[in-house]
Amino acid sequence: MSINGDLQKNEVLDRLYKKIIIRLIPFVFLCYIFAYFSRVNVSFAKLEMLADVGFSETVYGLGAGIFFIGYVVFAVPSNIVLSKVGARLWIAILMISWGIFSTCLMFTRTPTEFYLFRFLTGVAEAGFFPGITYYFTQWFPGERRGRVMSMFMAAIPLSGVFGGPISGWIMSVFNSNQMGLAGWEWLFLLYGIPTVLLGISVFWCMPNNYSTAKFLTDAEKRLIAEELEAENRIKDQQCVNNSILGFLLSPWVWYFCVVYFFIEMGEYAIGFWMPSIIQNSGIENLNHVGLLSAIPYLIAGVVMIMVGRSADLKNERRWHLVIPMLVGMLGLMLAAHFSSSLIVSMIGLTLATAGVLTALPMFWTVPQSLLGTAAAAGGLALINSIGNLAGFFSPYLVGWIKDLTHSTDIALYLIGISVLIAAILILRIPKERFQTK
């Protein structure tokens, strides 16, 4: 094809993928916001719940973390089921299920009930993120997924931007046992019901793949098929174990499990403990805690999208991944060392949140490009499930250390070191593994 012909095709593809992004991303973005709400809303409920039901910091840390044991149990089989029955049906079932289980947390009165409902919520939500990650491989070629993953995962900081103030407002307004419910009970109820309704709407808003999308013409579907088939042929030739369970034999899959675990240690320390860190720096009003917690997430959302765009334009992944992790490590160290100073602590939390959250979408572009078509569903789910074990260890570690020392400082230092380890492991990966073209 001539240069002019290549330029014309690229322009057509740019318009086509922009059309797909506009149609798909806002809805799955909204779904992920509620997924993240159900995962971390206990961080705000904790501010009143522990005193009401008599839980220790360690019980809270274990309950917050046991959610992720459900990830390990269910993420891989969930993605395999999704690849068989289709994304629309399976994502709808998952969202309705975790919305119900998350709402049931309002009935918690004992540690056992807390652990059980958190575990079941984790089982239901386990398949969502790896399912959507796999779903994107059915629409977008590798060189376009950096921006797509960044836009999708910007739901994490945006959930913090809105979730913090909304959670603080709910617990402030509903703090006088209205209708017999405490503020933290209203919190679980008012987040759970919209999740169920959103899950039902998946049936109308989410096509299984490009071939069933009514908003695409036949010509547009052929263009997407050509793009994906060309990429998949290359991946399948390079992938030694390209079968539905072949990912289990890939050393790179297990290596990425370890890398992702250390990155997630940072994310979940921030997600589950930021309100407590802000409160401990001298802010008692829950509305103010919520508003302050939105600042790091707001800045992180902007940085995440900018870095994702830069990575795609420059076709560079390694330093777009490593530099944010180093910034995240620095932020955690600052938040720990100056925990009694609100201003410096907020600067540290902002750097930590922006750095760690920006690293997440950059990370996922690498294993997506590595796995063959048959192994992708299980491989992505395994990396996600093993990595999310950090969601168990990180909050439990912070809670245990806080009970032991009456401070989160040492825990934040340890979490910062874990993010540094992830950056070192990324730098040890051969440069060609980061190429998407």
Image (spheres, rainbow, N blue to C red):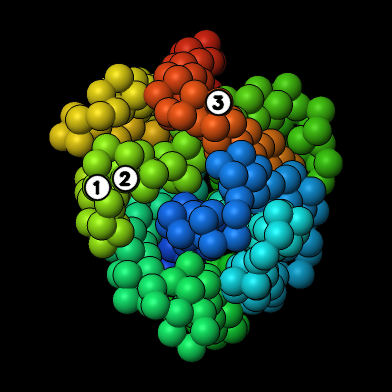
For disc 2, the marked residue is 279
Q: Quadrant of residue 158?
A: bottom left
The residue positioned 59% from the left and 44% from the top of the image is 56
The residue positioned 33% from the left and 32% from the top of the image is 352
Residue 387 place in picture, x, y as percent: 62, 35
Residue 32 place in picture, x, y as percent: 48, 62
Mark 3 vs mark 2, foreground winner is: 3
The residue positioned 44% from the left and 63% from the top of the image is 33
For disc 3, the marked residue is 404
- In the rendered image of this protein, does residue 426 appear above or below residue 117? above
Q: What element carries label 2?
A: helix
Residue 134 placement, left or right of 180:
right
For label 1, count other residues whose C-alpha is less than 10 Å away and answer few (under 14), some (14-19) or many (20+). Answer: some
- Is tag 3's residue or tag 2's residue first in the polypeptide sequence? 2
- In the rendered image of this protein, does residue 31 appear above or below residue 391? below
**What kind of residue is marked 2?**
Gln
**What kind of residue is marked 3?**
Leu
**What kind of residue is marked 1?**
Ile
Tell me how far mark 3 sits from mark 2, CA to CA: 19 Å
For label 2, count other residues whose C-alpha is less than 10 Å away and answer few (under 14), some (14-19) or many (20+). Answer: some
